[in-house]
């Protein structure tokens, strides 16, 4: 028996008269992630076709109070379990960007937490991809990432009109990471 949020697509394909094969493909399950100093925004998408996605889940994991190493360990376990329970196939994480104004403590904390997220995803046995906004702007589509994030029509076209605007960046990490 499959978990309630796993869909299976069945189709019968006849290659020659009198013969048929059964296609039991499952949609690709992608997790997109953005990381802050004390939280991880997570979006789980199902990729139905190259330009069609369905929102399956969205959540924010918060770093617990107390010593950061202990909190990192807790968040590692939470994210690792999230990936495995939802049977994700790939995790795409928005990478760090270079700051021209100097690096501040919250940026360093976010970089540490991003490492925890990467380790948890790798430990869960899924493919892990990271990409910065600047790289994604050069390698995905014809526009810069921020233009996609602001374009309500784009989100409607790909089936994610109801996604909260604050989670679009995490979803875009998954979308752009799925096209590579």
Image (cartoon, grey):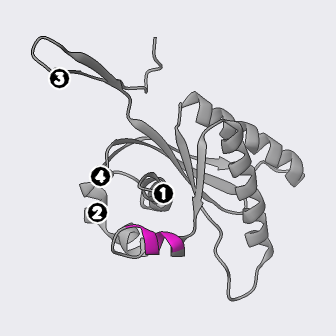
Q: Which residue is mark 2?
A: 154
Q: Position of residue 78 (x, y in %)?
A: 70, 38
Q: Earlier in the sequence, mark 1 or mark 4?
A: 4
The residue mark sitting in front, 2 or 1, is: 2
Q: CA distance from mark 2 to mark 4?
A: 10 Å
Q: Position of residue 74 (x, y in %)?
A: 79, 41
Which dot marks residue 167? 1
Q: Nearer the viewer, residue 137 or 106?
A: 137
* Front disc: 3 or 4: 3
Residue 150 included in the magenta stretch of the image: no
Residue under the image location 80 percent in, 48 percent down: 72
Q: Earlier in the sequence, mark 2 or mark 1?
A: 2
Q: Is residue 77 left or right of residue 12?
A: right
The residue to which callout 3 is attached is 15
Q: Is residue 138 visible?
A: yes
- Give the Cα distance between marks 3 and 4: 27 Å
């Amino acid at each position: 028996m499959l978990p309630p949020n796993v869909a299976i697509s069945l189709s019968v394909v006849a290659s020659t008269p009198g013969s048929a094969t059964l296609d039991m493909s499952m949609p690709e399950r992608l997790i997109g992630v953005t990381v802050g100093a004390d939280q991880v925004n997570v979006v789980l998408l199902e990729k139905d076709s190259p330009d069609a996605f369905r929102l399956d889940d969205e959540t924010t994991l918060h770093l617990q109070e107390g010593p950061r190493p202990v909190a990192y360990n807790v968040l590692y376990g939470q994210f690792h379990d999230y990936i495995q329970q939802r049977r994700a196939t790939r995790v795409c994480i928005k990478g760090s960007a270079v700051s021209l104004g100097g690096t501040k403590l919250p940026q360093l904390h976010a970089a540490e937490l991003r490492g925890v997220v990467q380790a948890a995803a790798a430990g869960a046995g899924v493919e892990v991809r990271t990409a910065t906004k600047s790289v994604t702007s050069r390698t995905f589509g014809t526009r810069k990432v921020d233009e996609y994030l602001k374009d309500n029509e784009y989100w409607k076209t790909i089936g994610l009109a109801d996604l909260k605007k604050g989670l679009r960046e995490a979803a875009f990490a998954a979308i752009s990471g799925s096209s590579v």
